[in-house]
Each structure stands twice: as structure tokens, then as C-alpha cells.
Image: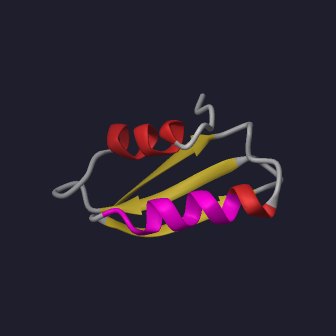
Amino acid sequence: METVTFNVPSITCSNCSNKIQSALGSMQGVNNVAIDLKTQSVQVEYNPDTINPQEIKKEITTMGYEVI
């Protein structure tokens, strides 16, 4: 397993957090998702043999959130 952290400044509430956590958590190869509203960060533990950070980032941006 590997971990990647994304800065997502458009996460402003628990609804945003829940939406992202649910979507990423259902992706094959994603083991754990931790979202910190205070730092507006999304930390994802994933299996690099199954999924890569670019695919995870694309899922976040597809939901309408900016990733920087």
C-alpha cells in the first residue's frame, strides 16, 4: 500500500467530505480515505498495482472539486 495526499481547497463542509469519501472509498484499489476539513486535505491509501494517484485525482475533479 502507498499513501498520497491531495490539497482540495474547495472542501468546506461535512457534506463535501462525505461525498468524496464515499466516491473514493468505492474505487477498486483504494484501501482508506481520510479527509481533514481544517487543512482541506484528502489522504488516500491505495494499492499501486490496482490504481494510481492520477486516477484518484481525476475522480475528485470529476465531482467538481479543485485539486492543487
Which one is nearer the viewer's eye here, 49 or 21?
21
Which one is nearer the viewer's eye here, 3 or 64?
64
The spot of residue 50 in percent (x, y) is: 19, 58
Image: magenta residue range: 17-27
Q: Residue at 74%, 47% (x, y): give it.
A: 11
Q: Residue at 60%, 52% (x, y): give it.
A: 42
Which quarter of the figure is the N terminus placed in? bottom left
Please state if 66 lies on the left or on the right of 36 as rendered. Answer: left
Q: Residue at 48%, 38% (x, y): give it.
A: 62
Please state if 2 lies on the left or on the right of 39 as rendered. Answer: left
The spot of residue 29 in percent (x, y) is: 28, 64
* Magenta segment includes 23: yes
The spot of residue 32 in percent (x, y) is: 46, 70
* Magenta segment includes 33: no
- For this orientation, the residue located farthest to the left is 49
Number of dots carrying numbers: 0
Magenta: main secondary structure: helix
- For this orientation, the residue located farthest to the front is 63
From the viewer's perspective, is residue 19 above or below residue 4? Answer: below
Please state if 43 lies on the left or on the right of 56 as rendered. Answer: right
Which quarter of the figure is the C terminus placed in? top right
Q: Residue at 52%, 36% (x, y): give it.
A: 61
Residue 46: quadrant of the picture: bottom left
Residue 26: quadrant of the picture: bottom left
**What colouring style does the render use?**
secondary structure
Please state if 47 lies on the left or on the right of 31 as rendered. Answer: left
The spot of residue 53 in percent (x, y) is: 36, 43
- For this orientation, the residue located farthest to the top is 68
From the viewer's perspective, is residue 58 above or below residue 44? Answer: above
From the viewer's perspective, is residue 32 above or below residue 64? Answer: below
